[in-house]
Amino acid sequence: MENNERISSGEGCADLTKLVSEDGKNMKSVLCQRCGSKVLCPGMAIFAEKELFLPSMRKKTGISQVEGTVDGDMLTAHWLVDDMYTFENVGFTKDVGKVKYLICADCEIGPIGWHCLDDKKSFYVALERVNHA
């Protein structure tokens, strides 16, 4: 397997050029950071910048609010998918308000992404929460 690359929203566009094709799609496979399971094949998602809050990464059973606050990150760089059947391997949490969080279906680590129940065609995977190979 090739070197897995991580990108943070604070890194420059030079790193994005290795991941985003000229037509805005992912050039590499998107993989789970923990188990390496394939989440998306190359060319299946579009790069999108949208400010979304994701709770801290932990096992599926740990995603819950405690005393009205949730530890997490505001992330802006995402892979946008318009059909949930495009994913190779992804699971969804129970509804948290009007949101379902995306997790790795194999190891249940997450959340790696975000889906609003009001928008049936927008599934976001945070670049910071996955690897690319």
Image: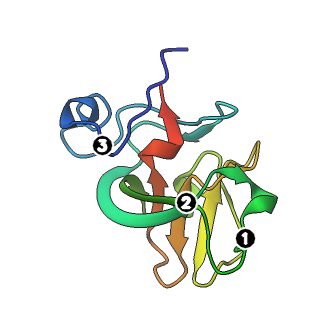
Amino acid on which disc 1 is placed: Ser
Q: Position of residue 5 (x, y in %)?
A: 44, 26
CA distance for labels 3 and 2: 16 Å
CA distance for labels 2 and 1: 11 Å
Q: Which mark is residue 64?
A: 1
Any part of residue 38 in sight: yes
Residue found 39% across the figure and 50% down from its top = 45
Of labels 1 and 3, earlier in sequence is 3
76 relative position to 34: left or right: left
Q: Name the element at disc 3.
A: loop
33 relative position to 66: left or right: left
Q: Quadrant of residue 6?
A: top left
Amino acid on which disc 3 is placed: Gly
Q: Residues within 10 Å of mark 2 (few under 14, many from 20)?
A: few
Q: Which residue is mark 2?
A: 72
Q: Position of residue 32 (x, y in %)?
A: 61, 38
Q: Residues within 10 Å of mark 3 (few under 14, many from 20)?
A: few
Determine whether 23 is above or below 3 in the image: below
Q: Name the element at disc 2.
A: strand
Of labels 3 and 2, earlier in sequence is 3
Instruction: Determine contact: label 2, label 1, CB under 8 Å.
Output: no
Instruction: Determine contact: label 1, label 3, CB under 8 Å.
Output: no
Q: Which residue is mark 3?
A: 10
